[in-house]
Amino acid sequence: MHNEAAMNFKKKITCIGAGYVGGPTMAVIAQKCPHHKVTVVDINKKRIDEWNSPNYELPIYEPGLVEVVREARDRNLFFSTDIPAAIQEADIIFISVNTPTKTYGEGAGKASNLEFVEKTARSIVEHATSNKIVVEKSTLPIRTAEAIERILKTNEKGLRFQILSNPEFLAEGTAISDLHNPDRVLIGSHDTPEGLSALQELVDLYAHWVPRERILTTNIWSSELSKLTANAFLAQRVTSINSIAALCERTEADVEEVARAIGTDSRIGSKFLKASVGFGGSCFKKDLLNLTYLCDYYGLHDVARYWESVVELNEWNQRKFVNTMLHSMLNTLSDKKIAVFGFAFKANTGDTRETPANIVVRELLGEHARVAIYDPKAIPNAKIDLADLLADPQVAPRITFCSSAEEAADQADAIALVTEWDQFKTLDYKKIYASMRKPACIFDGRNILNRKELFEIGFSVFGIGKPPLSHF
Ligand code: UDX
Ligand code: UDX
């Protein structure tokens, strides 16, 4: 880690947590600021080894990431498990460890588990030998900075730590372009001379590639709350259009036409109005539940119920997808083979956290269907997510993982498209239809397929929020 060039670096930046957020974010900072040294550390040695892999077999799949890592790694970007050394040398420390929903004790199922954040703050206190700026990158409940500060202040070495909040808005699958060209960078600080000077350092860092007018500065509490609010609004928007899709399915309206019509109203805007099998991902549900917990904590129970209903409706929407399948396939799925196209929570990622596919597969198996799953990137994660079922001798024989969409569809009664991978748009559906049992159905949970063409081939076609094209 310490080579001669390191002596010439202007600043040393350390990130604790080499996950979906820490890894890509630091890779881009290193790419854009070659005069700073960026070290990403993690307690997980396997993960670090993968970041360092000679063939660039990185632990996460993200378009464009390999190119950035290739450019910066071993130049000014380093991955290591030596957390104490990386803390010691850093001027700026980003905390990017995960903050899963608590599974035990008070707030179980809703509140964020801040155990890892707290441990990280303690290890900063333990190993630091100079003043530092500490940046919260993980999504955290409002006023977490206070808790981190309390820990940082316990140091008996006379050190001063300035805490900033700098939430990440990147979306998986487009992380690198989101980082290269963000709508905004948000940085919250205390309104003290030291706080403002720390803020300026971080602003200067991002200003290497982000236009200054896109760098928003706020007080630290607004910054923390803005991240939760942004995710809550985005999730609510998807759920809102999905709720209207359900109504479309009953009334012969077409949700895409409705989305286009409302999206042209500049007050509403056209993005994030794609009706789907439901939203997934590590953030939306977690942050909504977190918001719910906070509102309840502050006695705002009606507000809490409002946001909670977004989570509930999303789960209903995921189950509705399988209900549609059941009712369209003669009310029984027992022993029918369903090809599941896609397992990731969205396209262009191998991430399966909170993926709708998990619920869809479980519901299908609950109906005694057989499932054949194909995803270009997410099969290893799918196997982990379904481990309990794969260990159950009653269920396991009904699950297969396939290495192509064609293999999954062979002899299947239906295709359930759950993830909007581009490659699913251009498959040879004539050939696929020929290999399937008849009547063959296709359920497009993302509305990405050419419905008319599929119908003409012979499929009965069901989309989200669209009138079915059925041969029976
Ligand atoms: C991020 C944010 O940090 C989280 O708050 C946000 O809500 C979702 O995105 P993410 O990068 O997706 O989390 O999490 P993950 O991929 O699980 O990475 C976290 C990393 O931190 C893991 O590699 C884990 O090993 C590491 N970690 C965790 C530590 O290094 N130390 C710890 O004490 C705990
Ligand atoms: C989200 C936020 O967008 C990002 O700013 C934040 O930093 C992390 O959480 P991410 O979860 O990676 O990012 O992906 P996103 O593109 O927001 O999609 C979330 C889910 O909503 C996916 O399952 C996606 O398929 C679904 N979605 C999104 C829809 O169903 N319809 C839409 O119109 C948009």
Image: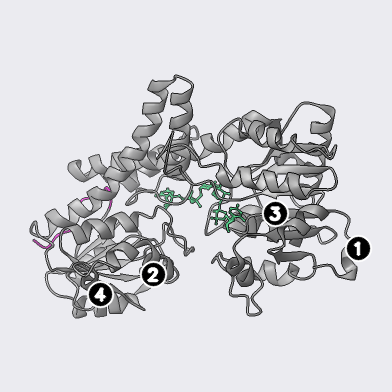
The answer to whether residue 321 is above or below residue 221 is below
Q: Nearer the viewer, mark 4 or mark 1?
A: 1
SS type, badge 1: helix
Instruction: Provide the secondary structure element on which disc 3 rests.
Output: strand
Taken as a whole, is the magenta stretch helix, strand or loop?
loop
Q: Position of residue 401 (x, y in %)?
A: 32, 74
Q: Could you tell which of marks 4 and 1 lies nearer the N-terminus?
A: 1
- What residue is shown at x 78% (from left), y 42% (from top)? 133
- Marks 2 and 1, how far apart in space? 45 Å
Q: How far separated are the C-alphas under marks 4 and 1? A: 58 Å
Q: For residue 409, which numbered disc appears in the image?
A: 4
Tag of residue 197: none
Question: Which of the pair 30/97 is nearer the observer?
Answer: 97
Q: Which residue is mark 1?
A: 7
> Circle 2 sits on which residue?
375
The CA distance from mark 3 to mark 2 is 31 Å
Q: Is residue 122 visible?
A: yes
Q: Amino acid at mark 3?
A: Cys
Residue contact at pointers 3 and 2, CB within 8 angstroms: no
Q: For the magenta stretch, what is the residue range?
A: 464-472
Please say if 27 is above or below 295: below
Secondary structure under badge 2? loop
Q: How many marks?
A: 4
Q: Which residue is mark 3?
A: 15
Identify the image quadrant of residue 57: bottom right
User: Mark 3 or 2, which is nearer the eye?
Assistant: 3
Q: Is residue 434 left or right of residue 205?
A: left
Residue lying farthest to the front in this orientation: 156
